[in-house]
Image: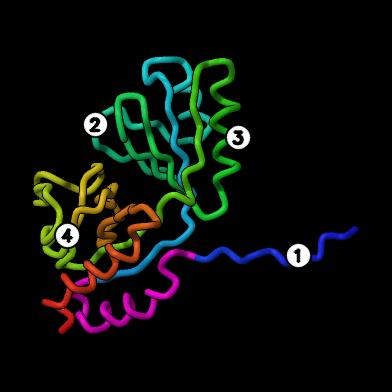
Amino acid sequence: MADTALPIPLQSPLTDAADRLAAATRASQGAVRLAELPFLAQVDVRLDAKGAAADAVGLALDLQLPLEPNTVVRAGELTALWLGPDEWLVVGPPGSQKDLQSRIRGAAGEEPVSVTDVSAQRTTLLVAGPRARDLLAHGCPLDLHPRTFEPGRCAQTTLARAQIVLVAREEPRAGFWVLVRSSFAGYLTDWLLDAAAEWTA
């Protein structure tokens, strides 16, 4: 019998918040820009940073895995975040997770490697604009001064008590990625909108 079930369209945990984020961005008159970047591919990779697999995976992705703690490497549409001495998060465009997993596993060959698709675990909030650092500083314990947390840095930290991965983007005026668990995305969005009231009221 033919399967007559219609495919369920993907729905972001912040679908209902898109209008509020856009309204806050407009109201701030350029001071802050808030948006969700839904469905980014996120693949967690664990391997020996000094082993042959690390170089092979870098060549397969055309993206060297960063070896310096809390740094980011970007090439084309892919970004690799250092999460630990043997752990990275590879972020790519929506829908690319299966291809990324295949390329990483194929490159590693017989070398020990763990490759896990964690795309559904988190969503990504964009926080940009001249006041982005001030906004994040309201609830993040890190020193976010540009001399300390400069573009190209990342950290596992908290924002308003929610666990996040914070990424300072390298592109001009690109701001920050806030990678947050889907179950906390609504709470964190409400917090950001409230904290941004200083510039959106």
Q: Seen in the image, is 59 located left or right of residue 152? A: right
- The vertical placement of 52 against 152, above or below, is above
Are the two marked residues, 4 and 2, in contact with CB atoms closer than 8 angstroms?
no
Residue 56 rendering spot, x and y as whole percentages: 50, 23
Q: Can you tell which of label 1 and label 4 is closer to the viewer?
A: 1
- Residue at the spot of label 3: 102
Q: Amino acid at mark 2?
A: Pro
Q: Given contact means CB atoms under 8 Å apart, are the residues at marks 2 and 1 in contact?
A: no
Question: Which secondary structure is most common in the magenta stretch?
Answer: helix
The span from disc 1 to disc 4 (Cα, nearest Å) is 43 Å
Sequence-first tag of 4 and 2:
2
First of labels 2, 1 by sequence position: 1
Where is residue 144 shown, x and y percent of the image? Answer: 12, 51
User: For the magenta stretch, what is the residue range?
Assistant: 12-32
Mark sitting earlier along the chain (1/4): 1
User: 31 or 162, which is in the foreground?
Assistant: 162
Quadrant containing the C terminus is bottom left
Q: Amino acid at mark 3?
A: Ser
Q: How many marks?
A: 4
Q: Secondary structure at mark 1?
A: loop
- Binning the other alpha carbons within 10 Å of mark 3 as few (below 14), some (14 to 19) or many (20 upward) gives few
- At 38% from the left and 39% from the top, the residue drawn is 80
Task: Identify the mark nearer the N-term, 3 or 2.
Answer: 2
What residue is disc 4 on? 136
Q: Nearer the N terminus, badge 3 or badge 4?
A: 3
Amino acid at pointer 4: Leu
Residue 185 in sight: yes
Q: Which mark is residue 5?
A: 1
